[in-house]
Amino acid sequence: MTARRVAPAAVALLLLPGCASFSQTLAAERDGGSPTTAAPSSPADGDDGPSCPAERAEPDPDRPVVDLDFRLSDDLDTVTGTETVVFTPDVATDEMVFRLVPNSPGAAGLGNRITVDGVRGDDVDQAGYEDAGADGPGGLYVLQLDGELAAGESTEVELDFTVSLGEGGFERLGAVEGASWWASGFPLLAWEPGVGWARDPFVQILGETATSPVADTTVSVSVPEDLTVLMTGDQDEPTAAEDGRRTWTSHEPVARDVSVAAGGFRTATLRTPGGVEVTTGVLPGADVGPGELADWVSEDVTELADRFGAFPYATLTVPLLPDEGGGIEYPGSILLAGANRTVLEHEVAHMWFYGMVGDSQFRDPWLDEALATYAESTAGGEGPPPDLDRVLATEGDVGAAMDEFDGTERYFDVVYGKGGAALLAARQAAGPPAFDAALRCYVQANAWTIATPADLAAALADLPAALDVLVRAGALDEEDLPG
Ligand SMILES: [Zn+2]
């Protein structure tokens, strides 16, 4: 997420990371071709470190399978739904934990709310809310299983839920005249593969705190027939209208989360030079047309793919919302609040950083926000170069967790500002070609996982000057360093 710090009246909002590019591999396989996601892995001098894989890592074949069935009410204020999850842990557990993002302090403060209305599952014993620093009825929903689920063993559960949409504004969910959107608008599976359940508390500052695995995700959305849906995943044509409604469906094989926007969007679709299908939508009175917005998106997708490797997803949708404030990224979809090109580039970069290379947004927020800010500042080339020494003198550790910041401004200054500057300085210290190659190796090796600072340090193992910069900025700790 990013908030437009230049807009004096802007409510700061953070972006959710999106995910991505395995779907291109799938598309290639479906077409009988060969996968096109091989990494641009070898720098010219061949010194790309011992751990750089030749190809992007594949997602876990036993990742969760999630089906979401949403219905937006005729008054556009309420979403009811059913979520089906087939879950196969890689670490034994006797429970399942879901994160209720609409009940987070910021979202609930605008009138958003989610309740779980029913639970089914052969292995479910009890279910209930946990507070986790959220508003009522709680920030987590926990299913107690009737026994231990061994690693590699599967269970299927179904949850019915209701989401009340608030008044709009720069938030993940909202409803205004003629448009509604809900991202993280369902119980979000809070599993960190190899580690366990992420029960991190919500915080008062503007930022993400979720950790979730990539899931093979199918979405179905019933809305009044005059609305157009733009969401995560490769969308089919809507059904024919029946009883005044149409149903829109999509599939994304590697989604950590889902965003849906429904409104009177005027849309444009294009295919980028790299084959990504981009669809944009704008509401009446928007500052930019959908075609121009799609051109911006295509330029960002192409430019960032040149730097970080193939775009993670087959599709990207960008609905432009009628609020100013920034952008919020979701896998394969960006809620853009204001037609700002720098914000857009930041959100597109999140498709690689969080969407594909995931992280704990609570524990290590810099792994997606500093990298997205770094991508934004090195790609655009607008304005004078930042005064790195001045920004790096900002007090505070780039690698701090979300609960270590006393306010949103400080969080932005340290994680986005100082973090982005530290990555730029690390690139200068190591030499841009070597640093860029190492960063591509980090992406290749950690695609579709929850990466850690130690993973990034490992990718930079042959670049001690870069590691020194990141340690001095408090992004990396000594224990993160290789060897
Ligand atoms: Zn961001």
Image (tube, rainbow, N blue to C red):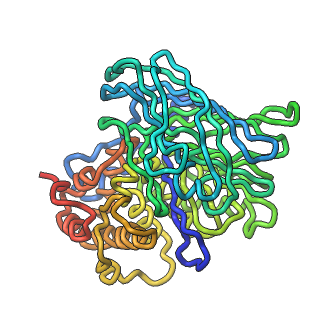
In the drawing, does residue 471 fall left or right of residue 202? Answer: left
Q: Which residue is depicted at the point 80% across and 52% down?
A: 264
Q: Residue at x 70, y 58 (%)?
A: 167
- The residue lying at 30 percent from left, 62 percent from top is 399
Work out whether residue 63 can be spotted. Answer: yes
Direction top: furthest residue: 122
- The residue lying toward the viewer, choosing from 356 and 310, is 356
The residue sitting at 57% across, 43% down in the picture is: 258
Q: Position of residue 92 (x, y in %)?
A: 31, 25
Q: Give the camera-side residue of 125 and 460.
A: 125
Residue 357 at x, y percent in the picture: 39, 48
In the rendered view, would you say 117 is above or below 21? above
- Residue 308 position by quadrant: bottom left
Q: Position of residue 329 (x, y in %)?
A: 54, 55
Residue 107, placed above or below residue 258: below
Residue 454, above or below 25: below
